[in-house]
Image (spheres, rainbow, N blue to C red):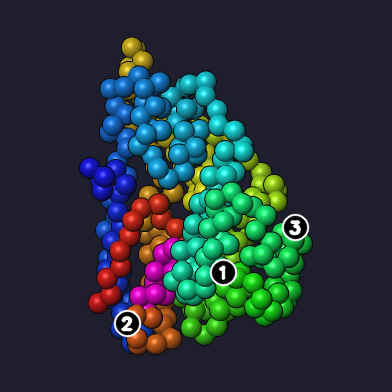
Amino acid sequence: MHEVLSGELHLTVNVKARKVCAVDLVYRSPSYSSLLINQTPEMALKRLRLLVSLCPYSQQSIAANALSLNYSVSDELLQREWIAAYCWQLYQIYQCMDANIEALTLTAKVRQGQYHYANALYGCDLTHWLLLVKDPQQLLQWSQQQKTPYQRLIYQLQSETWQNIGSTLQSDAQKTNNLLTLTLKRMIDLAQLLSHLWQWSLPSCNELGYWQGAAPRGVLMHKAIQNVDSIITDYHIITPTDTLCASDGPLIKSLLNTDFPTNELAQQQACLTMLVHAWDPCVPFSITLT
């Protein structure tokens, strides 16, 4: 039952001449929706609180709108949830590359709510860092100092070992899906949240009847159908990971044609694991190289 609820992702990656040439993706989405059917809206929301372990406040906020309930989640709770999600993602990426205890410890502390440790990760005041990151030259100079965990992380991701992981487009100007870009984007998101510069938006209803809103990993959508007795007859959830893991989605596109700097199997496995963590699916995943 736990595996059905949490979902799963398995990737079989075929490598020839140090390049990914084929990817077989098997994805099973978390199946919370079926457990909300035949419930009242109030009971469905209570069930959702018990069932969802990842991003529960984001889920509840959008579900409440889909269920027409007068229920709201504070920006403070959402902010804590998103910070924890982004810290965990960066923790996982760093763990694949470098077992640096300082980096892992500091990231874990920020994730637990000790936000004053963030400056030690970035190496400067976060508002200042958000300004310098807009200038590629200043960003390069910042990373070259290699004094703090995130400086070292970005510096290493620019090396030959990692720079082509996830690059699917030939034009350098269009390489937006590589490991470095995805990791840097997440660091920017985290710095904005910690600096209270994030702009929160209210959920809205699209033309298909889905209530949609932002979640840490992307757009989250809920749609509830009720009968005349206010009993749920159908419920649909589309998560950011559903979009990520589509047959023509961004995950497969970033994996295909990835160039490895080595034939060493363990290094190739680490590269792909880091890239999947950079996309951050909300389900457990495994990778098999062939």
Taking 187 as reference, is 251 left or right?
Answer: left
Q: Amino acid at mark 2?
A: Leu
172 inside magenta stretch = no
Marking on residue 265:
2
Question: Could you tell which of marks 1 and 3 lies nearer the N-terminus?
Answer: 1
Question: Could you tell which of marks 2 and 3 lies nearer the N-terminus?
Answer: 3
Question: Could you tell which of marks 1 and 2 lies nearer the N-terminus?
Answer: 1
Q: Amino acid at mark 3?
A: Thr
Residue 88 is situated, as x and y percent measured from the top left of the image, at 49, 57
User: Label 3: how many residues lie within 10 Å, few (<14), some (14-19) or many (20+)?
Assistant: some
| Highlighted magenta segment, given as a residue range | 268-278
Locate the N terminus and report the quarter of the image it occupies.
top left
Residue 224 is situated, as x and y percent measured from the top left of the image, at 38, 28
The residue that label 3 is drawn on is 127
Residue at x 28%, y 22% (from the top left corner): 38
Placement of 43 over or under 182, stated as above or below: above
Residue at x 32%, y 82% (from the top left corner): 265
- Taking depth in this image into account, of 2 and 221 the one nearest to the observer is 2
Q: Secondary structure at mark 2?
A: helix
The residue that label 1 is drawn on is 102
Q: Residue furthest top?
A: 229
- Taking depth in this image into account, of 115 and 187 the one nearest to the observer is 115
